[in-house]
Every structure is written in C-alpha cells, then in structure tokens.
Amino acid sequence: MSPTPAAAPSGDKEFTEVVVVRHGETSWNASRIVQILQQGQMDPELNEIGREQALVVAHRLSKEAKPAAIYSSDLKRAAETAEIIAKVCGVTNLVLNEPLRERHMGYLQGLKWDDAVNKNPDVFRGSDIFKITEGSDPDSRNQELPGGGESLNQLNQRCVSYLNKIAQEHSGERVVVVSHGAAILELCRHTDPPNSSIRRNIPNTSLNVFRVSSVTRRWILERCGDVSHLDENGILKNSFGGDGSSA
C-alpha cells in the first residue's frame, strides 16, 4: 500500500517542501563537451545511464514522504525522469510544464561556442562566452543571448515565479520538481544574499531541497547537489567513463 501524501517534515503548514531533481544523464552530457555544447531547450533523451540514475533517485524518494504531486519540464530528458519517479513513488498527479525548461540558449543551442561564432560572426564578435552564459559579471545577468535566448535574470524570474505558484497550491505539503542544471542554479541563487558569488555543482539526478513559504514567499535552501543515492549504488563510478563527474 502506497503511503499517503505527507505534510512538509517541518510540520509548518505555511511552508511547502519542494524537492528539485535534475534530470538524468543524456548522451550530450556524456559527450564531455557539455561545457561548450549547449543543450538549452533542445530535446535529447536520457541515455541508459540516465535512466538508471532516474530509477535510483526514484527508489530513494519512494522511501521518503510521498509527494502530493510531481511537476516537470516538458523536455524529454526531464519528463522521462519525472515519469520514472512518479511510477516508482505511486504518484498519479504528474504535471509537465514549459516554465521548468532549461534556459533558452539562442544561437548557442546544440552548438559548440566556436561553431556558433563561425555561423553567426557578426552576432558574437567581441562577446565573452563565460560572462553571458554564467553571469560572472553582474551586468551580464540582463544580457539576452542572441537568437532569441534568455538572460539569466529572465530565467530566474520564470523559474522562481513558477515555484512560488507551486508552493501556493501545495502549502504544507511535499512536492517533487524535475528541471535542468541552469534553471536549478537560479533557484538556488534565489536563496543567496544579494551580490553573492556562491558557486554550486548540480549533478544529474541530484536532490536540491527547498522550503518555500506560501504566505511570505520566503525561500530556505536545505540541501543542494545531493547524489548520495548514486554513490551508494556505484553509478557515479560509471558516469562519464568512470571519474564520477557529472554535468
């Protein structure tokens, strides 16, 4: 018999516990050029390791309080991860939605930086790839990527607004959200002090746990980048050829 949906562990009905999971590995992740090849809103599927990762994180979540609902990006790599979690956890309330998608990378989507520049030399001439994709310069957070891409602040607003909406609908409950690396980094950033430069790693199928107030919209980041479930099952050793790294 499946457990009934539980209140957020804190017992505080004002807060929603939001467990944000990054999707499993794709062949693009595993190619080792992920730092210069931008998936963005392109739509690759999970590879076999990614499906195994999703199954392992699903079994971990099934041993914890049952979520009231699972929300996911509608891109295949996230949706498949969410479907595996929903099946293992016995959750029928699965919602796929665009606001949880990865950052739109404009002309960079599906390309290495050098290839994007070669295809669009006038657009990218003089641009600093690190600044416009990672937001290393505060001013760059408002810079939209050429070709219809989003700025980091636009990505932040999109994802934070949707999580606040979820918290409002599930006050006092636990929900699981499946999303993407850059999107999850922005969710974590929302909990940081102003002008913070904290750097984080969000591996595939990592757990990132937030408590979000449905009243004040206060956010608390309780856990970030947790992949202990992969380590326990030896999957990290197999990812990316055996070095245990993930992207």
Image: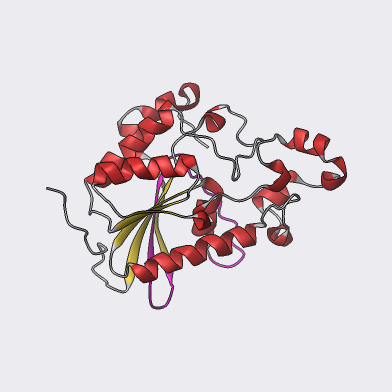
Colour convention: secondary structure
Residue extending farthest bottom: 215
In the picture, residue 42 is in which quadrant? top right
Q: Residue 229 vs residue 99: left or right?
A: left
Q: Quick check: is 168 in the magenta stretch?
A: no
Residue 226 in the image, given as x and y percentages of width and height? 39, 45
Q: Nearer the viewer, residue 8 or 222?
A: 8
Q: Nearer the viewer, residue 115 or 190?
A: 115
Residue 60 visible to the viewer? no
Residue extending farthest top: 241
- Residue at the (39%, 32%) spot, across then down: 51
User: How many labels sit on residues?
Assistant: 0
- Residue at the (21%, 45%) spot, across then down: 63
Q: Quick check: is 210 in the magenta stretch?
A: yes
Residue 52 visible to the viewer? yes
Please state the extent of the stretch shown in magenta in the rendering.
Answer: 193-219
Q: Residue 150 vs residue 95: left or right?
A: right
- Residue at the (86%, 40%) spot, across then down: 121
Quick check: 163 above or below 200? below
Quick check: 121 above or below 242? below
- Residue at the (36%, 69%) spot, across then down: 169
Magenta span main SS: loop
Residue 192 in the image, given as x and y percentages of width and height? 52, 63
Residue extending farthest left: 1
Residue 243 in the image, given as x and y percentages of width and height? 48, 25
Residue 147 in the image, given as x and y percentages of width and height? 74, 49
Q: Nearer the viewer, residue 128 or 82?
A: 82
